Amino acid sequence: MWRSSGLRLGARLCCPRGGARAPAERGHRSLVSCIDPSIGLNEEQKGYQKVAFDFAAREMAPHMAEWDQKELFPVDMMRKAAQLGFGGVYVRTDVGGSGLSRLDASVIFEALATGCTSTTAYISIHNMCVWMIDTFGSEEQRHRFCPPLCTMEKFASYCLTEPGSGSDAASLLTSAKRQGDHYVLNGSKAFISGGGESDIYVVMCRTGGPGPKGISCIVVEKGTPGLSFGKKEKKVGWNSQPTRAVIFEDCAVPVANRIGNEGQGFLIAMKGLNGGRINVASCSVGAAHASVVLTRDHLNVRKQFGALLASNQYLQFKLADMATRLVASRLMVRSAAVALQEEREDAVALCAMAKLFATDECFAICNQALQMHGGYGYLKDYAVQQYMRDCRVHQILEGSNEVMRMLISRSLLQQ
């Protein structure tokens, strides 16, 4: 049942404008036209979007449920995505990146997330890691690490959170003591996406005193003696990507693997997260878009009390609310992406606002979609439940939405 429904879902989502026209040709109005994600994009961006939608429909949507239920990390699929340039979307071209903008990346991740939100979220984290090396690394580091990451021959993980420092990231305890031409790392990181499977770990660790100025950024390569991993976590969603603790026990890493200067790590981490917030919000928008389309279709075929659910005004109003929240989220995320690309002063606050608003609203959309499917929505044969589960964690990671409120209020009160 799932494979056929997954293929149908992908076909409906991959060409949203065509999907909007087809019902109109039969004499019916279509909801998809008012939530068309290509509205406002230039022709190049529409091209990137179509490639991403087509890839999501062909390579992701038919397998999304299997990856979730069997907890499979789809390495081969991601390497196919990298062949389209999705392994380093906003990384410079001289090291294999696509050299696209933050807005382009948002458009791409939103489209891919309609095929599998969990896997797209990992791809977005990988992109964030490659960008950090590309932006803050030396020329030698850029050319050593970035090319195999852009092809996804190698995978990357971002290591900031610790068992005792989640939202209070500046209090992290993982230490890196310099001994000659190496740093010796001790400590552990928690909830690391790709942990145990990734080849490159971009680690924030303490090389100096307490607080953010004592933190540095070091690349640790898989196979380094002293690097190990905890058990694979059992999660509500995001099951197509493994999550493990990353453990350092007298783990000696060359000083040449330090990205930027000593004490620059917290700045690098936060700048990475500004983009990461746009990325994960884009994934939420993709999940919500897919959920609205599925719900629209369900209302048009499901009958109760002798009539189609689509004729029920209460459900019509609910669907209208979902569509409105979806479009508002998309516009806010894209506005923040442009601000980040332009390095505007309000970029940090706008990224926080977009992440807060879009992840909250899009989870609510997915949850409402499940409700409007009734009992069917609670079955794993129906995709809405997976979109809901996969986007729930977006309200927690890349800085919880409570931290987003702190950043926004701080921006306001400092003026």
Image (cartoon, rainbow, N blue to C red):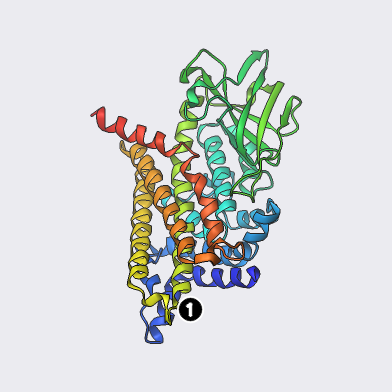
Q: Is residue 310 above or below residue 364?
A: below
Q: List the single residue furthest toward the bottom.
A: 26
**Residue 130, position as x, y percentages in the image:** 57, 40
**Residue 42, position as x, y percentages in the image:** 38, 62
**Residue 83, position as x, y percentages in the image:** 62, 56
Q: Is residue 270 above or below residue 38?
A: above
Q: Is residue 302 left or right of residue 188?
A: left
Determine the residue positioned at 64% across, 14% down. Answer: 178
Nearer the observer, 372 or 330: 372
Quarter-wise, where is residue 353 in the image?
top left
Q: List the single residue furthest toward the left.
A: 415
Q: Quadrant of the C terminus?
A: top left
Q: Is residue 272 above or below residue 323?
A: above
| Amino acid on which disc 1 is placed | Val
The answer to whether residue 106 of the structure is visible from this angle is no
SS for tag 1? Answer: helix
Q: Quadrant of the N terminus?
A: bottom right
Determine the residue positioned at 38% across, 50% down. Answer: 333
Q: Is residue 209 left or right of residue 413?
A: right
Q: Is residue 119 left or right of residue 374?
A: right
Residue under numbered circle 1:
301
Label 1 environment density (alpha carbons within 10 Å; few <14, some 14–19, many ≥20): few
The answer to whether residue 52 of the structure is visible from this angle is yes
